[in-house]
Amino acid sequence: MTYSLILLAHGSSDAEWRAPFERLHGALANRMQTSLRLAYMELSEPSLESTVAELAAEGIERAEILPLFFAAGRHLRKDVPSQVETLKATHSGIALTLLPPVGEHPAFVEALAAVIAEQAGETSKARR
């Protein structure tokens, strides 16, 4: 079964806001064998809709959507699930799964805690 992982960011009309997500995607895509796409929920291209349409056209059978959000607020509780349900109906040949936001992953929490501790000058304490 062919698979792709979609990194989903909120989106912004400001290209500078999108730049860190594009750099992250580029760095990861270069070192991963998994098909990896970057999409935006709104205000930016490629949109989630256009990304799923491209994957479906390429014959991808399964895709997971990993929100690059700290937490599941209204967008991840209502807006994105609604988008995903619409996409499932439109592209029935591709199984779509919405994952929990990256901010809820324990490794993300640890990495963020290390950055915060380093900024506070407490690197040795952060590693205990």
Image (spheres, helix red, strand yellow):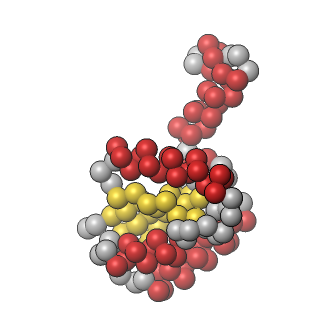
Q: Position of residue 119 (x, y in %)?
A: 70, 23
Q: Quadrant of residue 121?
A: top right
Q: Position of residue 97 (x, y in %)?
A: 47, 67
- Extreme residue toward the front, this view: 15
Q: Position of residue 82 (x, y in %)?
A: 61, 77
Q: Which residue: 52% across, 76% down?
A: 49
Asked if residue 99 is positioned above or below residue 126 in the image, the reply reads below
Judge left or right: residue 123 versus residue 4.
right
- Extreme residue toward the top, this view: 124
Q: Quadrant of residue 11?
A: bottom right
Q: Position of residue 78 (x, y in %)?
A: 67, 71
> Can residue 72 be seen in this snapshot?
no
Asked if residue 8 is positioned above or below residue 80 in the image, the reply reads above
Name the foreground residue: 56 vs 114. Answer: 56
Q: Which residue: 36% across, 46% down?
A: 30
Quadrant where the C terminus sits is top right
Quadrant where the N terminus sits is bottom left
- Extreme residue toward the bottom, this view: 90
> Can residue 13 be seen in this snapshot?
yes
Q: Quadrant of residue 94?
A: bottom left
Asked if residue 77 is positioned above or below residue 33 in the image, the reply reads below
Number of marks present in the image shown? 0
Name the foreground residue: 110 vs 45. Answer: 45
Asked if residue 52 is positioned above or below residue 106 in the image, the reply reads below
Name the foreground residue: 104 vs 83. Answer: 83
